[in-house]
Image (cartoon, helix red, strand yellow):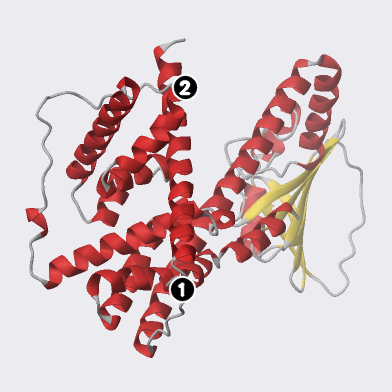
Amino acid sequence: MIILMNMIEDEQSLSKFQKLYNQYKNIMYWVAYDICKNEQDAEDIVEEAFIKVIKILYKIVEDEIDTIRCKNLMITIAKNTAIDFIRKREHEMISTEVVEIEKENKSAEDICIDIENYRELVFCIGLLEEKYRDILRLKILYELNSKEIASILNISEANVNMRFMRAKRMLKEKLEECKNE
Amino acid sequence: MSDDLEKRKSEYLLKLALEEQLEEEDKLCCNIENKKNIDSKEKMLHTFSKRHEKRMKRVLKKAKKVEKKGSYCGYQQKYFQLVAGVSLFLCVGIVTVTNVEAFRVPILCFFEEMKENYLLLKIDNNKTNIVSEKFQSYVPMYTPEDYVIIDVQESEKNFCIKYENSKNKNVYLYYYWEQMGTIKINTEGAIVDEIELNGNKAYIIQNEDEIRIHINKELERIYLNGRLSYEEALKVMESVEGMK
């Protein structure tokens, strides 16, 4: 009986991807269209973006498809896929991406956060550059690994780790600036 | 507070902060759109081309496979957990039960009884210990191919062994009596033959596919009865060491 119930439950969960597609195809299309300015290209970008979504499908909880978190993830994937699409179309080599090198040979510094600094932290996250905000969200909020993030952002794994370290450092600097003010 | 705990606290707060900032950003966007009275592109539905719909069907199929695999793995994992749980329960149960003498003794007696009553004996020409020592020399050393011993009955002065062919289920019985008086044999419609085997007189009665062989040595008698070829039956009776 238990086995049967489990199998029934699995039948229902098979439509998770379909739900995602139906929910976000439109917004992803417009995000892609804003970047590439071409209808057909935008549709191709949407298709490519959803292929990427398949790889991280296990991370998406079906009950959370309607949340802002999921929406932001889909938009991030669509946006980065569109940027990469434009680069390829204009024959830009992906290896010309900026390889972020840390000047100091330190491991990632951990940010010490107290509850008193919480409101400043939220504010400082908003001040970060979009690419650093995205990497923090993908790594911490969506708990994706470096390989998955590299696939979404179309950068190397090494660059993912470097960008994440830099994002944390910049956030820490902004937080200290806020405290001093 | 320890460093590890401090680190975890910071990570948790960062996660909350990211989530809150995301929600604030989303609210801000909605407010701007409302103020400017702009219809969010989100609300403007785009009609996707048939080409896109066709290609997305393939993507959907791929996604279904991935989801199915994931759910199967999850189901498999649950199944393995269930099996592991049941196995653990059985192991613990068996260990507990066998450690308690009140349970152990009756269980062992039960299995002993089963072994005595129902065990299927295998043919082994070298072993005659299917009967007690005093009868062992009267057990045939030869057993025809595909025949196995399926039953042994023994009393103080005689024993009987039942053989069965594992392929065609033919059966023959072998008897030994320590002391046997005169008996009458029904030979109606049968072919009767009298020969000498191992220095003893042997009476062979054949009736269609059934054979009976009686051999006497003083008061001792061995007797074979069943479905067996003439040659094989003779080989069986010749192999009885005790009658040589």
Given the image, on which type of amino acid does mark 2 rest?
Answer: Glu
Quarter of image, res B29: bottom left
Q: How many marks?
A: 2
Q: In this orientation, does residue A4 appear?
A: yes
Kindly identify which numbered label has been placed on residue A147. none
Given the image, on which type of amino acid does mark 1 rest?
Answer: Asp
Q: Is disc 1 on the same chain as disc 2?
A: no
Q: In this orientation, does residue B195 appear?
A: no
Residue B180 pos. (x, y %): 88, 41
- Judged from the image, the secondary structure of the residue bearing numbered disc 1 is loop
**Residue shown at the point (73%, 50%) measured from the top left:** B201
**Residue shown at the point (44%, 21%) measured from the top left:** A114
- Judged from the image, the secondary structure of the residue bearing numbered disc 2 is helix
**Residue shown at the point (53%, 55%) measured from the top left:** A67
Residue B68 pos. (x, y %): 51, 63
Quarter of image, res B82: top right
Residue B147 pos. (x, y %): 64, 55
Most foreground residue, A21 or B22: B22
> What residue is disc 2 on?
A116
Whether B63 is drawn above or below A38: the answer is above
Kindly identify which numbered label has been placed on residue B39. 1
